[in-house]
Image (cartoon, rainbow, N blue to C red):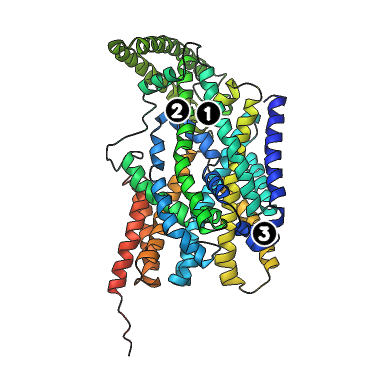
Amino acid sequence: MKNIDWLVLVVTLGGIVGFGMWKGRASRQNIEGFLLADRQLPWYHVTLSVMATQASAITFLSAPGQAYTDGMRFVQFYFGLPLAMIVLSVTFIPMFKKLNVYTAYEFLEGRFDLKTRVLTSFLFLIPRALSTGVTIAAPSIILSTILGWDLYWTNIMTGLVVTLYCMYGGSKTISYTQMQQMFVVLIGMFLAGYMVVHLLPSEIGFVDTLKVAGKMGKLNAIDWKFDLNNRYNVWSGLIGGFFLQLSYFGTDQSQVGRYLSGESVGESRIGLLMNGMLKIPMQFLILLVGALVFVFYQFNQPPLFFNQTGLDKIANTQEYRQIEAKHSQIFQEKKVAVAQMFDALKSGNEQQIEQTKVKVTEADKASGELRTEVKDLLKKTSPETDTNDTNYIFLSFVTKYLPVGMVGLLIAVILLASMGSMASAFGSLTSCTIIDIYKRLLHPEDTDQHYLTVSRWVTLGWGIFCIIVAQFTANIGSLIEAVNILGSWFYGTILGVFLVAFYFRNIQGNAVFWAAILAEIIVIYTWWIDLTAFLWLNLIGCVLVIVFAYLIHLLTPKKVIG
């Protein structure tokens, strides 16, 4: 990066974080202020904070790469979100607000018993801690790629910076930081999309770019075919996605804590409903940027491997130079075919469109085979190198082609997103540990200042744990998929516990406790044998808890009174 990029990066990060810490300074003096911003935030804070919590660096690193390699069908993952927001606004928010709880799991003790509360809290803590480790790894990829730093030490540095920031700042600091962050994020992604089209040949406009992307199969946003083994279609998004989003926003403390900080039921409701309206367009925009980058690389030769640090390890070998020569030849042939396709699209010549599409597809297939050869060479030369470069595609484009200043802004966007989501995650891990375990089981009677001090040390402990997890995420593939797979292991089970609590008033604690354990075992086994796409695990876990709880309730002898 140039000096001006560093200046933009430092000023953007420092300004937003400094402003957030200044605005939240009065709310970190007590435990309610530290964890829930004194429950005084307006709806627009809730909306932007909820969106920022979900939109981590993974979103802006991995989603464009996902669209580049697989098209835009990932957007269907969010189709169940608006429906989930409606259900939560009608049911969960009024109940949580009425009970004045710190965490979602406090409610379960009053409805069931202590062991069910603690079990559900642990089912939250496990995936949230693991996914936060993945979230730490995402910005580390940026810094290690740009600066050539060792990824493991970069994980440590990134994780510790955010951990210390969270120890100092409270919930209001996080909220104000996230609000400013979302404005910068949206501006940055609009500029990135504009620049991709601007860098294409002058005769190609935005509509033309979309036409080329469509013919290349990258605008496949809707798939109506019902297939349990297809990760992303309308049905998995509406049904599986609905249960995942309902559980994530209704029972995951990282999100519940965001809208519990709203100053009233109405403000929290509006905040969630606005999130439901804005999230899909925002995700569509991010994926569209990835599709546009794909078109850009139809006119500009892409690297055979997008992780430049990994590529440098084999760049001087004879085998790689031979593969690169073949790649250049294939690209020149494809570039001619793409230009012919563009002309055919302009003239509406369907026969020529199909002929050129076949040529381009064949060239892409040949390039894909060469990419496989490069990855095999990497495995042989440097076995520790991650050969899945999906997460590097957008970053590679940003650093090589965007003008000075914009590189710094886009890096700031990704780092800000990471800090916001990590801060919310650390806050939720701390809330559950302190409220559901430490205060409830280990140290029930003490001063507010004591719990505030312990909260900061617990934040440090979770930060260290998540950094350790981050060290094992180098070879897990697409980060955005990895996070959602982790959530799908547990969220359906947690949601089932809450639905039983709300709608099956006769079922008591023992029944739902053992039902949750049995359901979780089956969900993990279902994923292990690859029985179905991961989104359906959320529905399976939820339904199993309800069914098992009901059966155990029926089979349990009832006490006779009298």
Q: CA distance from mark 2 to mark 3?
A: 42 Å
Q: Does residue 506 sit above or below 231 in this rendering?
A: below
Q: Residue at x 67, y 59 (%)?
A: 457
Pointer 2 or 1: first along the chain: 2
Callout 2–callout 1 Cβ contact below 8 Å: yes
Pointer 2 or 3: first along the chain: 2
Residue 180 or residue 475, whichever sits in front: 180
User: Mark 2: few, some, or many residues within 10 Å (few <14, many ≥20)?
Assistant: many
**In the image, residue 11 lies at what x, y percent?**
71, 34
In what element is the residue under mark 1? helix
Which amino acid lies under the numbered mark 1 shown in the image of this protein?
A: Phe
**Residue matched to label 2:** 68
Residue 71 appears in the rendering: yes
Which amino acid lies under the numbered mark 3 shown in the image of this protein?
A: Trp
Q: How many marks?
A: 3
Q: Does residue 262 sit above or below 151 in this rendering?
A: below
Residue 535 or residue 189, whichever sits in front: 189
Q: Does residue 421 sit above or below 347 in this rendering?
A: below
**Residue matched to label 1:** 394
Callout 1–callout 3 Cβ contact below 8 Å: no
Pointer 1 or 3: first along the chain: 1
Residue 467 appears in the rendering: no
Residue 251 or residue 20, whichever sits in front: 20
Q: Residue at x 72, y 48 (%)?
A: 22
User: Mark 1: few, some, or many residues within 10 Å (few <14, many ≥20)?
Assistant: many
Q: Does residue 560 sit above or below 380 in this rendering?
A: below
**In the image, residue 393 lies at what x, y percent?**
51, 28
**Residue matched to label 3:** 457
Callout 2–callout 3 Cβ contact below 8 Å: no
Which amino acid lies under the numbered mark 2 shown in the image of this protein?
A: Tyr
Res. 479 mark: none
Residue 283 or residue 274, whichever sits in front: 274
